[in-house]
Image: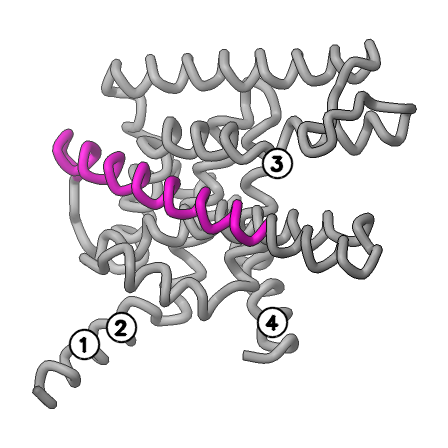
Amino acid sequence: MTLSTYFYQFIKGISSFITAYDFAKKHRIWAGLFKNKWISIVLCLVIFFVAYHSIYAVLGFFQGTLIDHETGVQQAGFFSGLGLLSHELFFSSSIKYIVLIALEVITFHCSTKTINLLTGRNFEPSFNDFYKAEIRMIKVAIRSWIYELIATILITIIFEIFGLGWLKYPFIYFAQFFFVGLAFLDNYLEQFKIDIKDSFAIIYQHVGASVAIGMLSLSLVFIPIIGPVVGPILGAVSAAIYFHYENVAIDYIESMKLMEKAE
């Protein structure tokens, strides 16, 4: 894989996200999502959690009490505080994955409906399907959190060794965006019975798109009130659109059939 390939994927990911807005609006992807009271309750809890977290971080910024959790140093000024605020809002690992797990009901619903519309399939998920999707998201989130932590440590060590610690953050952020995008892309692959191990392997071939989808989705999720609804809807739809037109699932299934014949 070359940088030009990653860049091409990144642009395609951005394009898919833009397309997802019109697609979701035209087909009312969210329709039927809130007919189940338990989904509405979960969403209300997430909205409250995100709003509380966002307000708490913003108040900390204006009061000058934000702390860099890596160094333990309190914000020293406006720009220092601004950097810590963005990190606190969007890039705290535990917060990201807790929110992704909680919002899986929306992500799975929208991914399912988008695939139905793109392929002509008529699959209506049951409560058991949502339950299995939630369990899988927990597994994906834990694995992603571990991988992200390892990547962050390695990036930090490499840049600190060369005295370029200030340059590490863009690379750390790209890693975090990638794993958020991976969660949405995995929702698509899940519905073609592709296991987590193979799903990760496939998504590693589409790093650019995963970064783009993760970046835009994460930016939306932490907008109070509307973010927890809009973010996963567009993340799920854009991931499905991207992989559908890249024929990822079809190529994987065909390759598996060829391998079975070869055996």
CB contact under 8 Å: marks 2 and 1: yes
Mark 1–mark 3 distance (CA, rounded to whole Å): 37 Å
Left or right? Give the position of 170 relative to 117.
right
Q: Quadrant of the C terminus?
A: bottom left
Identify the amino acid type marked 2. Tyr
CB contact under 8 Å: marks 2 and 4: no
- Which residue lies under the disc numbered 4? 8
Is 153 covered by the magenta stretch? no
Categorize mark 3 by other alpha carbons within 10 Å: few (<14), some (14-19), many (20+). some
- Mark 3 vs mark 2, foreground winner is 3
Q: Residue at x 30, y 20 (%)?
A: 39
- Which residue lies under the disc numbered 2? 252
Measured from the top left, where is residue 253 in percent x and y? 21, 72
Mark 3–mark 2 distance (CA, rounded to whole Å): 32 Å
- Which residue lies under the disc numbered 1? 256
Measured from the top left, where is residue 185 in percent x and y? 40, 53
Categorize mark 4 by other alpha carbons within 10 Å: few (<14), some (14-19), many (20+). some
Left or right? Give the position of 262 relative to 10.
left
Q: Earlier in the sequence, mark 4 or mark 3?
A: 4
Categorize mark 1 by other alpha carbons within 10 Å: few (<14), some (14-19), many (20+). few
Q: Earlier in the sequence, mark 1 or mark 4?
A: 4
- Mark 4 vs mark 3, foreground winner is 3
Categorize mark 2 by other alpha carbons within 10 Å: few (<14), some (14-19), many (20+). some
What SS does tag 2 mark? Answer: helix
Q: Residue at x 37, y 40 (%)?
A: 142
Mark 2–mark 4 distance (CA, rounded to whole Å): 21 Å
Mark 2–mark 1 distance (CA, rounded to whole Å): 6 Å
Q: Which residues are magenta?
A: 125-152
- Mark 1 vs mark 4, foreground winner is 1
What SS does tag 1 mark? Answer: helix
